[in-house]
Amino acid sequence: MVAPIEGIKLSRLGVIKEHPDLENDEDWRKIAIERLKDYMKRLDSEEKKLDYIKEELTKFGYKALFYQVKGWRVKRFK
């Protein structure tokens, strides 16, 4: 992936819906990003990571333009 995950826009209500324990936490954004990073690391293949990004994050307005597999040349999503 090319873009840093720290720049992702998060809805406070969406984060609380997924992680109710962060409702009263001051660092809710930072913790939510760390949990997303951990989840992405647990996905066992690059294809599953690409599918997650393409299917799940596009529901929220994110559009992946490019992808890279195994360090090879960057390709454009079709």
Image (spheres, rainbow, N blue to C red):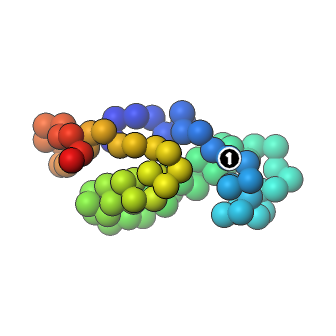
Quadrant housing residue 55: bottom left
Q: Residue 60's x, y, as percent?
A: 53, 50
Q: Residue at left 27%, top 39%?
A: 66
Judge whether 8 appears above or below 31 on screen.
above
Q: Which sits in the foreground, 38 or 5?
A: 5
Residue linked to disc 1: 11
Q: Which sits in the foreground, 62 or 43?
A: 62
Judge whether 6 appears above or below 33 on screen.
above
Inspect the image, locate mark 1, and give the three-letter code of the amino acid beneath it: Ser
Q: Which sits in the foreground, 65 or 3?
A: 65
Q: Residue 35's x, y, as percent?
A: 58, 55
- Compared across the picture, whether 66 is left or right of 20 comes to left
Q: Residue 44's x, y, as percent?
A: 32, 66
Q: Is any part of residue 41 visible from this angle? A: no
- Compared across the picture, whether 75 is left or right of 9 comes to left
Q: Residue 29's x, y, as percent?
A: 68, 44
